Amino acid sequence: MEFIMPLWPAYPELFLLVMTCVVLIVDLFVSDDNRIVTYGLTQFTLAGCALLTFFTGNPEPVYTFSGMFVDDLMADVLKLLTCVSVIMVMVYARAYNAARGMFRGEFFTLALFATLGMMVMISANHLLTLYLGLELLSLSLYAMVALQRDSVRATEAAMKYFVLGALASGVLLYGMSMLYGATGTLEITELAQLSTQGVQAQLVLVFGLVFIVAGLGFKLGAVPFHMWVPDVYQGAPTAVTLFIGSAPKFAAFAMVMRLLAQSLGAEMLVDEWRHMLTVMAILSLVIGNLTAIMQTNLKRMLAYSTISHMGFLLLGVLSGTIDGYGAGMFYVVVYVLMTLGSFGIILLLARSGFEAENLEDYKGLNQRNPWYAFLMLLLMFSMAGIPPTVGFYAKLSVLQAVVSIGMWWIAVVAVVFSLIGAFYYLRIVKLMYFDAPVDTAPIAASGDVRALLSANGLAVLVLGIAPQPLLVLCIEAVRASI
Amino acid sequence: MMQGLPLLSLAIWAPIIAGVAVLLTGGDRNAQAARVIALIGALIGFAVTIPLYTGFDLQQGGFQFVEMRTWIDTLNANYHIGIDGISLLLILLNSLTTVLVVAAGWQVIESRVSQYMAAFLFLSGLMNGVFSSLDALLFYVFFEATLIPMFIIIGVWGGPNRVYAAVKFFLYTLMGSLLSLVALIYLYFSAGGSFSLFDFYQTQLPLVLQVSVFIAFFMAFAVKVPMWPVHTWLPDAHVEAPTGGSVVLAAVMLKLGGYGFLRLSLPIVPDASHLLAPIVIGLSLIAVVYIGLVALVQTDMKKLIAYSSISHMGFVTLGTFLFNAQGMEGAIIQMISHGFISGAMFLCVGVLYDRMHSRLIADYGGVANRMPVFAALFMFFSMANAGLPGTSGFVGEFLVIMGAMQVNFWFAFAAAITLIFGAAYTLWMYKRVIFGAVANAHVDELQDLNAREFLVLGVLAVLVLVMGVWPQPFADVLHVSVNELLAHVSFSKLPAQ
């Protein structure tokens, strides 16, 4: 291992850490009326972090901190996207938080720490680094869910999230310890080498793999480890749901890549985890889509839809090919884009004392504001995977990956359930377009939210007409890193 | 003279861009502007398709006006478009129908006018895209994207049960096309990583796989046509859709299915097509005969015409799977003719509905006394619907029956029965609605056609008549394409043992 430790690959993380502490301190001296200062500083931090990520980016992997930390193309792309999506979350959430007394320092510092955790996870080249990042992210998220401390629902959701999340972390850690037992190393590149050569304690390795997959299933929210998802999505304040539903998925995807594709990407091990992922993916598609139909709460419905999307994501991963991983990455990027947009609309319609989280609240949106209704229409059709929106190509590339390894029957199952899924997305469109409005309050939004939300919605269409650049980026990022 | 222009791309994108322009007019305050822009857009969309016809080389085989640009390199999917005689006629039909539909909705649609007009323009561009795609992925994208505007059209401007109809329409057709997506992905790998239809045409496949692919395609296109027994979405969609929606649905959208059979099913999996042709022919004959009987007992005019559509589209699938030139040309001519006639029939019902707000036959009677001009035009279209010689309805059906005769006498016999049923249900409806004494006070107050309605129906009447007495210009563009297709289909694509 390299003796010299270049610091520059970790500049974004270091910057973020320092600035988070600055935000923490500055916020102490800011009065409630001037909280916008904290907001501005947070956005500056995230933007700076994104820029640093961009300028320290490099196509070849660079290892540092004695090989515990890696800066490769996949990490760069995912970190950049993480920063951008957190910036978007902050913009969308501002008015919502201000109306609910959550526009306070805690929200910002917790979000920044969570972002740091994600970035560490994404760049981890060591199981302990990965775990540290994961815990930093998770602990921040538990606290964020409980940020509205008077809300019974939010507290319950936080409790549930914490207990199940801690359990999942334990399971994951246990799996990691078995990997260590089988191979004698925790470093991902070494693990990859050793598992390719084959180790004597193959059984221990496979046993550890089971725990790792279970832990990953928890973090992704795939069936049968999905129980926390609907409650947390519904119980948490919408701004926090938006946060949980967006950027952490990048980190979760990176974790899947680092653990399964990199550490345990050897041929025979792929065969081992492919079966587990297949079961999880199909169950996620079935349960996610079927249960979503019955929901009357939009946040809960989107939670179940998330579960089914994670099923699709796993389909890309389980193919075990570079194209498949690239398809998975493309899927997660598209998923986050759609989630940001749709929760952005929920936040936009919410106002003081009104959450806009029931399906009924979307009735007649087209008559109230055709533009937002159109954006939501694009987002919903994209989630359903109808061309010419980008959601179609996400599904297409994943299905292609599955068919390429000869598992076309999974593709058939997946399209059947995405047909069922189309129903509940259509219902949103139906409510917005076909029904008369119940709620006629004017929809107020500041200019930045309007512009960003419009860009977000239209991106779904524009990327749908020209998906090539993003698709290439994802495949190249994976190819350069795995 | 117009060589430099990418005419085919214009035919696709001009209506779509016009649709965006119409949307930009905003709310109903600017409704008139929306209408005018929509009409101009539709006319431009139609105008750019005329040079496609005049510049089309009748002798040259293959595809003309081909454009090719890289689209998604990683998937090896290209923006590859071009037309042969089959697509040409359908593109003309589609672009013309759009103009008529925009004109037909001029005064009738009063709420959310810009969205209504834009939806039709988008739909028009997307369907031209389907008819000209030479890349399977591009085809699929256009094919599915057409669902979105139609869903909105039925759901927003439709009748009382519109939500049910719109969702049923969407899910039914999506079900079919999703399975064909899996087939397309499978073919992508079989063709060595390409979505080009030409590569698909050359790919050899064992029979079992051909049959699987055929079934997947069949799910998509049979639902679209629609064939018995997957037709049940159509009567619902037609009854609930606004007049314009019904017209486009019947005149053009159903043809996406017929076109899909010709462009994908037959040439990509010819052996499976031959093998399963008897089943398709059987289903077509059931549609022709049984659905004709179902149409006879309808009490709702729109439903009656919807069932008559299914019955007539049975001729299209029947002719397609006879594998002879008469049958196939008949099928294509039937598609075009049905586009004119069913469009006109739905417009006629729309004319009555706008005045009386009822589609029930029982609410009418003696309309001829108050609307003589309308009665005359409606008479003409009814005759055409019944397949009277001298109208376009006769040409296609006659050719298909001729083609069927070459294969099997009883196919032709069963198909010919429909001429009787068709005459029965159409003319009986006509008699109950138009003739007799004035049935009630509402009928008594009816106003005859205004200039706009007369113009729209008049254009269609001329077309139906011209196509009926002089089908040559329509048939000429088809010969080479149909012969090439039949020649391609006659070669087995089974891999050599």
Image (cartoon, rainbow, N blue to C red):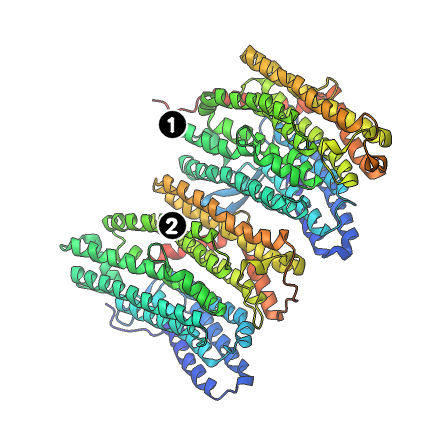
Query: As shown in the figure, which amino acid type bears the numbered disc 1?
Result: Val
Q: Chain of mark 1?
A: B
For label 1, the SS is helix
Q: Quadrant of the N terminus of chain A?
A: bottom left
Q: Is residue A169 left or right of residue A478?
A: left
Please indicate, yes or no, whether residue A475 appears anywhere in the rendered image: no
Residue tagged 2? A316
> In percent of the image, x 29 and y 50: which residue is there?
A276
Residue depicted at x 73% and y 51% = B111
Mark 1, Cα crowd under 10 Å, few <14 / some 14-19 / many 20+, is: few
Residue B271 in sight here: yes
**In the figure, residue A68 lies in which quadrant?**
bottom left
Residue B138 is situated, as x and y percent measured from the top left of the image, at: 54, 41
Q: Quarter-wise, where is residue B369 in the image?
A: top right
Q: Nearer the viewer, residue B172 or A386?
A: B172
Residue A388: where, in percent of width, then height? 55, 48
Q: Residue at x 72, y 19 (%)?
A: B388
Please, which chain is the residue tagged with disc 2 on?
A
Residue B484 in the image: state x and y as whole percent: 56, 23
* Mark 2, other Cα within 10 Å: few <14 / some 14–19 / many ≥20: many
Would you place residue B472 above or below residue A455 in this image? Answer: above
Reading the image, the residue beneath label 1 is: B208
Q: Where residue A459 sits: x, y (%)?
A: 55, 57
Mark 2–mark 1 distance (CA, rounded to whole Å): 27 Å
